[in-house]
Amino acid sequence: MLFDCDGVLVDSEPIVNGVLRAMLGERGWALSEQECLRIFVGKMVRDEKARIELHTGQPLTEEWLAEFRARRNAALEQELQIVANAHHAVHEVHERLQARIACASGADRHKVELQLRKVGLHDYFEGRIFSGHEMPRSKPHPDVYLAAAAALSAPPQRCAVVEDTLIGTAAGLAAGATVFAYVPHGDADVFHRAGVAAVFSDMAQLPGLLI
């Protein structure tokens, strides 16, 4: 079982979105919460470099990205919460699959590990945490899921992926995995049309899907 992190295990996206909106606003690009989520959720900020530079009229520098990560991490340390029932779901799946689980995120490693430690899930995934930043390509490409499957010595076609975005879903499907979409809010139909095996709205439901 391969878990995404943001939005699946931790409720980080509103926090990160708030920091990003504030910093883009400081550069003159005012975005609503929904606009910011639509543009950036599931992506690396640097992948939207051209769009950011177009709207701000300023270069996207490594210094700005470093400041974003620092402000983001400080906010996560202070505010981050676990997704409801995620601890139960991870524990049950970890026991059932004899620890053959991994976390495969599009985020940078420091962020993923910070978040898992913050909410008490790190021990379940220690040694099996994969970052899209360390792959040739990040999501929606399958690289991070292929790396996680290989580390578990499992063909990706025998792996299940838990995702909450269409970008991540595309990555899991491209890897050849079976994808379960966690959709607590929003349009479940778009995930069905994307080709997921099932859509569920409560992490407590996840162990029951693995029959």
Image: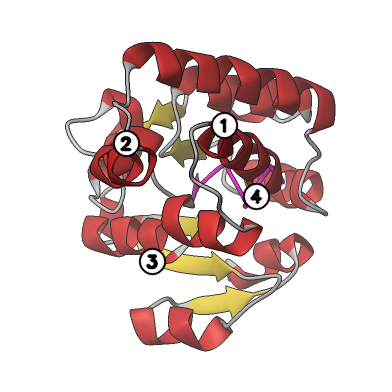
> Mark 3 and mark 4: span between their CA atoms?
15 Å
In percent of the image, x 57 and y 39: which residue is there? 25
Q: Amino acid type of disc 4? A: Val
Q: Are marks 1 and 2 in contact (CB under 8 Å)?
A: no
> In the depicted view, which residue is nearer to us: 90 or 13?
13
Q: Earlier in the sequence, mark 4 or mark 1?
A: 1
Q: Is residue 97 above or below residue 192?
A: above
If you read the primary sequence from the N terminus, does the residue marked by circle 4 or circle 2 appear first? 2
Residue range corresponding to the magenta coloring: 1-12
The residue carrying mark 1 is 26
Mark nearer the viewer, 3 or 1: 1
Find out whether the residues at labels 4 and 2 contact each other: C-beta distance under 8 Å. no
Q: Amino acid at mark 3?
A: Thr
Return the residue at label 4: 93
In front here: 99 or 86?
Answer: 86
Which residue is at a point 82% across and 54% down the rendered structure image?
84
Give the number of the disc on residue 178: 3
Mark 3 / mark 1, whichever is N-terminal? 1
Q: CA distance from mark 3 to mark 1?
A: 41 Å
Which label's residue is closer to the chain start, 1 or 2? 1
From mark 4 to mark 2, how far is it between C-alphas? 47 Å
What residue is shown at x 61% (from left), y 44% (from top)?
A: 17
State the mark number for residue 57: 2
Q: Residue at x 32, y 36 (%)?
A: 57
| Residue 163 can be seen in this image | no
Q: Report helix, strand or loop for mark 3.
A: strand
| Kind of element beneath mark 4 | helix
Q: Quadrant of residue 22?
A: top right
In the image, 19 versus 171, the foreground residue is: 19
In the rendered image of this protein, does residue 154 appear above or below residue 68?
below
Crowdedness near tag 3: few (<14), some (14–19) or many (≥20) residues, C-alpha within 10 Å: many
4 or 2: mark nearer the eye: 2
